Image (spheres, rainbow, N blue to C red):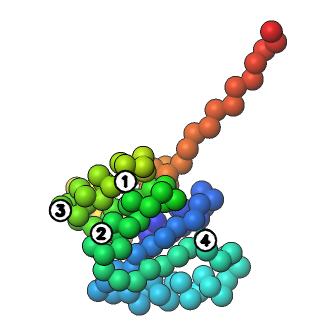
């Protein structure tokens, strides 16, 4: 669920797969968002098994990026990267070192999804 805030701040929508072992936090957050001023469809929380849900998200043409934090470094992460490469998705793999969830948050997750746009201005003919 730590990816939700950067995604919303950058003006995107997100689909989050809740933890299979501890889904209550994600479901509670979804209830709070449903009763807030956040428009419907901005954050979508799915419950279920990651190996069943993630391949569909990785191969779906309307999904533009995957954050694989929590998936692990096994065959599932590799197969998701291959499925995402078929339609040129951005994929963020979890860092090799364990994530310190109590550390001061940085902007690394935010900058992984930002796009830099350049506007060219012609100077006459």
Left or right placement of residue 5 versus residue 55 in this view: right
Q: Which residue is at 57% across, 39% downward? A: 116
Between 1 and 89, the residue placed more toward the observer is: 89
User: Which of labels 2 and 1 is toward the front?
Assistant: 1
Count neighbours of disc 4 (C-alpha within 10 A) and say few if under 14, some if 14 to 19, many if 20 or more. some
- The image position of residue 118, as x and y in percent, is 64, 32
User: Which of labels 1 and 3 is toward the front?
Assistant: 1
**Quick check: marks 1 and 3 in contact, CB under 8 Å?**
no
Q: Considering only vertical position in the picture, is 2 above or below 40?
A: above
Between 17 and 80, the residue placed more toward the observer is: 80
Q: Considering only vertical position in the picture, is 4 above or below 47?
A: above
- Marks 2 and 4, Cα distance to the nearest angstrom? 22 Å
Q: Considering only vertical position in the picture, is 44 above or below 68?
A: below
Q: Which comes sooner in the sequence, label 3 or label 4?
A: 4
Count neighbours of disc 2 (C-alpha within 10 A) and say few if under 14, some if 14 to 19, many if 20 or more. few
Count neighbours of disc 1 (C-alpha within 10 A) and say few if under 14, some if 14 to 19, many if 20 or more. many
Q: Which residue is at 78% across, 14% downward? A: 123
Q: Considering only vertical position in the picture, is 64 above or below 46?
A: above
Q: Which comes sooner in the sequence, label 4 or label 1?
A: 4
């Amino acid at each position: 669920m730590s990816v939700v805030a950067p995604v919303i701040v950058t003006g995107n929508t997100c689909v989050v797969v809740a933890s299979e072992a501890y889904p209550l936090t994600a479901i509670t957050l979804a209830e709070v968002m449903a009763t807030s001023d956040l428009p419907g469809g901005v954050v979508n929380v799915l419950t279920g098994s990651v190996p069943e849900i993630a391949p569909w998200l990785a191969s779906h043409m309307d999904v533009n990026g995957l954050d694989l934090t929590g998936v692990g470094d096994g065959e599932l992460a590799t197969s998701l990267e291959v499925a995402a490469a078929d339609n040129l998705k951005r994929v963020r793999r979890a860092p090799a070192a364990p994530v310190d969830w109590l550390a001061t948050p940085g902007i690394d997750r935010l900058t992984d999804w930002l796009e830099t746009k350049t506007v060219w201005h012609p100077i006459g003919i």
